[in-house]
Amino acid sequence: MSLWHTQPVLEQLNALNKNTIGEVLDIRFESFTDNSLSASMVVDHRTHQPFGLLHGGASVVLAETVGSMASYLCIDPRKYYCVGLEINANHLRGLRSGRVTATAHPVHIGRSTHVWDIRLRSDQGKASCISRLTIAVIALGEEPPAR
C-alpha cells in the first residue's frame, strides 16, 4: 500500500524547485517507492565549505527538501500544509565531488506530525549523513507554531 496521498510525478516535483534554494544547489527529485522519496544534489563549489568538502548545511538543505516534499505528498493540500519543526544531522563522511542522494523514509505519519529518517549517500553508495526531520501538519487557515 502506498504512503502517498498525491502520487509523485518527478517532473512536477522538480518544477517546484524553480527560483528556490533547490534550484541554486541543483537538487533533483529522482525516484520514489510506495514509502520513500529520493533526491540528489550536486557536490561542487556551490555546496562546498572553505576546505573543499560538502558543507553540512547543504546536506541539511537536501534532507529538509526531500523530507518536506515527502510530507507534502502525504497530505491533502486542499486541507493542510506542512512546515518543518526540527531537523538534526549527523555528518559521517566528507564528500568533495559528484552528487549526493538523500532518501526519506517515514518513521511516523500522524495527523499532526510526520517524522522522517533521511539517509544521504555518495555516488559510491557510502553513507555521508543521517538526518531526522519532524514536520508539523497544519490545517489551512491556522497559524504555524512559533519558532
Image (cartoon, grey):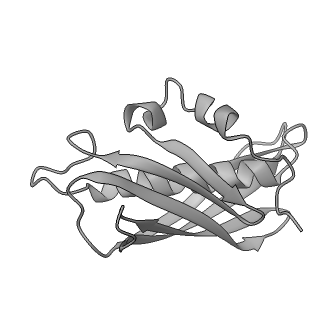
Location of residue 32 by image quarter = bottom right
- Name the residue: 74% across, 66% down: 35
Residue that protrudes farthest toward the left in the picture? 51
Residue that protrudes farthest toward the top in the picture? 19
- Residue 69 appears left or right of 49: right
Q: Is residue 84 visible?
A: no
- Residue 10 appears left or right of 50: right
Give the percent coordinates (x, y) of residue 57: 33, 54
> Does residue 131 lie above or below 47 as drawn?
below
- Name the residue: 36% across, 74% down: 126
Give the percent coordinates (x, y) of residue 20: 49, 30
Q: Is residue 129 visible?
A: yes
> Does residue 51 lie above or below 88 as drawn?
above
Location of residue 25 by image quarter = top left
Give the percent coordinates (x, y) of residue 46: 26, 39
- Residue 28 appears left or right of 57: right
- Name the residue: 78% across, 64% down: 34
